Image (cartoon, helix red, strand yellow):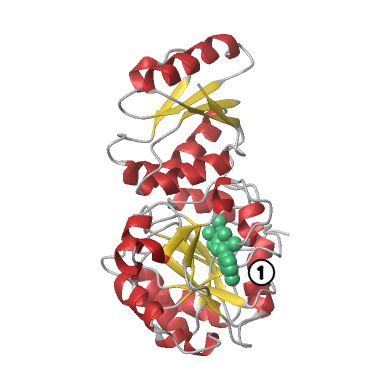
Amino acid sequence: MAMNTEIIELNEQNIDIEKLKRAAQIIRDLGTVVLPTETVYGLGANALSSEAVLKIFMAKGRPADNPLIVHVCSADMMSNLLHEPLDMRAKILIDTFWPGPLTLIFKRSELVPLEVCANLDTVAIRMPDHPIALKLIELAKVPIAAPSANVSGKPSPTMAKHVISDMDGRVDMIIEADRSRIGVESTVLDITSEVAVILRPGGITLNQLQEVLGKEGVVIDEMIEGEADKPRSPGMKYTHYAPNATMQIVRGDRNDIIRYIQSKIQSTANASTSVGVLCSDETKSHYRGACVLSIGSVHRLDQGASNLFAVLREFDQMGVDIIFAEAFAEDEMGLALMNRMKKAAGFNIVDV
Ligand code: AMP
Ligand code: MG
């Protein structure tokens, strides 16, 4: 049954505290609130309550074995969620990257509801770099568990209109604000082992982490490429970010990619099949006879990552049946961008 969703609009430069207090009260009353963060919009609830957290899984249709990230507004707020006090490495990471798009995996205490950590003995925590999210957590006086506020499997929401279309009628409140600045989820870093492991590339890059932890101090989990058979992070095994269309990533030299995609448009597009091309500003003029959307310049893949989810949703709006996507360089933010694209494509990749 559809719920009655209250929708409020807040300006992050000038937050209406009275409105935000209502949102905080909903969190305290074990309800659900969609909130803006710098990565993507989140679907929040009191992280200390099983009852509240179950509502997140219900609203999203999220599998119960996919754990949630807990959001805090201070390092103090998480001390009783942890099995042991912060060590030097954790303190340095927190000092350097919080608030910001870095989620840290810690050994957890008994206080973390099993639903939040999907029965694991660890918990994922971050401090968002967004004034509305931080103030909401502060007013609610409890940590807020919040996965991306999309229906499970769909592209994550980076604009207010995305959450309205996915979550209106499924949550108690939606906070509308500006477009998410980073536009791609946080980097998930497991620091329960001697060498830190990136379980999901995101808003903080491998290079940034290596500057703090040293070149040998951090590795990327092989499952990120869809190659290992036992996922270390439960979220890795699910279809994610998927547009309605089937999607294929085309990898190779620039001219070969263009030639392959243009010939595919010619052989595939007809009265009943609409073809989309996901490309860059530098290549978009090469395609004819398809719905062509650019994620931006190949020289600004940070902006490309930020635009990806909105572009995938736009293909849905246009009713595209099949998307051919140019592959991008997998360094810096290109790593997170390509990770999301590969998942959106269900690892359907052709080398040309
Ligand atoms: P979402 O909030 O939808 O962006 O997804 C959260 C991500 O964090 C998923 O990929 C989860 O699998 C991952 N995650 C959350 N908690 C843990 C944990 N305790 N150990 C490993 N990965 C986790
Ligand atoms: Mg998600």
Front position in the image: 258 or 295: 258
Q: Residue at x 46, y 42 (%)?
A: 338
Residue pointed to by mark 1: 55
* Percent x, y of residue 91: 36, 81
The reply to whether the residue tagged 1 has its Cβ within 8 angstroms of ligand 1 is: no
- Whether 253 is drawn above or below 262: the answer is below
Front position in the image: 33 or 253: 253
Horizontal side of residue 292 vs 226, given as left or right? left
Horizontal side of residue 251 vs 271, given as left or right? left
* Percent x, y of residue 114: 68, 77
Quadrant for ligand 2 reads bottom right
Q: Residue at x 51, y 53 (%)?
A: 163
* Percent x, y of residue 160: 44, 53
Q: Amino acid at mark 1?
A: Lys
Mark 1 is surrounded, within 10 Å at the Cα level, by few (under 14), some (14 to 19) or many (20 or more) other residues, namely: some
Q: Residue at x 37, y 52 (%)?
A: 179
- Whether 263 is drawn above or below 301: the answer is above
